[in-house]
Amino acid sequence: MDIGLVIDYFDPHRGGAEHWTYQFAQCLTAGGHTVHVITQSAGHVPPDPGLHIHPLGRIASRLQRAEAAESMLRSLQLDLIHDIGMGWYCDVLQSEDGSRLAQWERKLRLLPSYIRPIKRLLIHWLPRYREFRRLMDRQFGEPRRTIVAVSRMCAADYHWYHRVSPHRIRLVYHGTDIHRFSPEHRPRWREPVRTEMGIAPQEVVYLFVGHDYLRKGLATAIRAVGRLVREGLPVRLLVVGGNGAGKYQRLARRWDAGGAVLFVGRVEDPVPYYAAADVFVLPTFYDPCSLSVTEAAACGLPSITTRWNGASELLCDGEDGYVLQDPADDVALADRMARLIDPRVRERMGGAARLLALEYPLERNYDEIQGVYREIRSKRKAA
């Protein structure tokens, strides 16, 4: 098939959605399909005869961006179009941001209660939010379009916030490259990375991976580490991804965790840091289905995340990770982190996490989406 993939940025090093889209495009071309990627811009991508990239250039307006994507797609003779959240001209919509309406509502919890009504008014009236709502109205409003939800949480949000009928929604969890992300990389990377970062052998390393520090709950993680440091526990928090660490460095100092929090910044390959870590933490306020949780599991790390992360649906609380109810509850997070100080508990839960990841390899994700494609083509033939 000639398949169109539509995404704002086609760059495997930019973020979770971009990384997933690049991997999925590779699976498609390896399966004999021809893939046309419509995007604002692309990062460095190795040549692939089955992959054709159509850059639109930088377009500030989201509505104009979607219109430009539609114009490009209409000029191509494609069998199926799969949009990752940029536009509205598609057969399959898979918003890696989930529901923006749900995300905005959850992020209000980051604000003091007396400010939330004011912020709600701004969300209703500011041009940026109004443009988002117009885009989402067209994305979710087409009754013949199939919606791929990457978690049950997202499926529920699409039904509640966007009135999408459940019969249009297909649940497909993310998959992970279980060979790239594996405990087998520990002998190569664990000691070199820990030595480079000045981490002592007896220290327990909690890993945070994410670019959006605010939404993904880095402040909660820092406060929790501060509590553990004051108890005299040998802990470090390794922060990979994002930028603008200054505010969070100051927060770490206020919570007596300044020397325990290490900011790595953006990296092309997170595998060495998974290998160096003992536990993964992501107290996120909203995440459709965090790839980093399944990557950590594939590397044999137990995760601590929240019920507002779609990936938490895959975890069994207390067996392969912990699921918190409140992303802002640093006391609860510190408690779960302290439980994982014991290496025997980490080993048991990390082994269970690896087994979980083996149930959701990248190939399963690819096959399930291929099933959605076949369903759409079958309905067309029947019509």
Image (cartoon, helix red, strand yellow):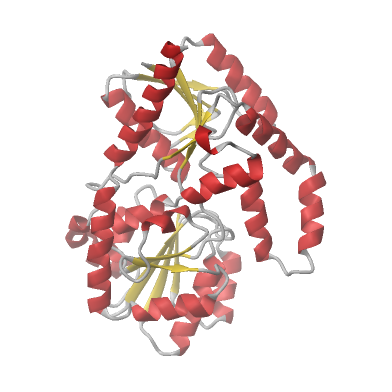
Instruction: For residue 201, say whether it is visible.
Output: no
Residue at the image position 47 percent from the left and 11 percent from the top:
383
Question: In the rendered image of this protein, does residue 163 appear above or below residue 332?
Answer: above
Question: In the rendered image of this protein, does residue 36 appear above or below residue 336?
Answer: above
Q: Position of residue 185 (x, y in %)?
A: 21, 56
Nearest to the observer: residue 142 or residue 330: 142
Nearest to the observer: residue 250 or residue 306: 306
Residue at the image position 35 percent from the left and 28 percent from the top:
370
Residue at the image position 33 percent from the left and 60 percent from the top:
273
Question: In the rendered image of this protein, does residue 46 appear above or below residue 149?
Answer: above
Q: Quadrant of residue 361?
A: top left
Q: Position of residue 303 (x, y in %)?
A: 37, 65
Question: In the rendered image of this protein, does residue 213 appear above or below residue 159?
Answer: below
Instruction: For residue 175, say whether it is visible.
Output: yes
Q: Quadrant of residue 27?
A: top left
Q: Position of residue 300 (x, y in %)?
A: 26, 61
Nearest to the observer: residue 372 or residue 103: 372
| Lateral position of residue 122 relative to residue 40, left or right | right
Tell me the quarter of the image containing the N terminus: top left
Q: Quadrant of residue 338?
A: bottom left
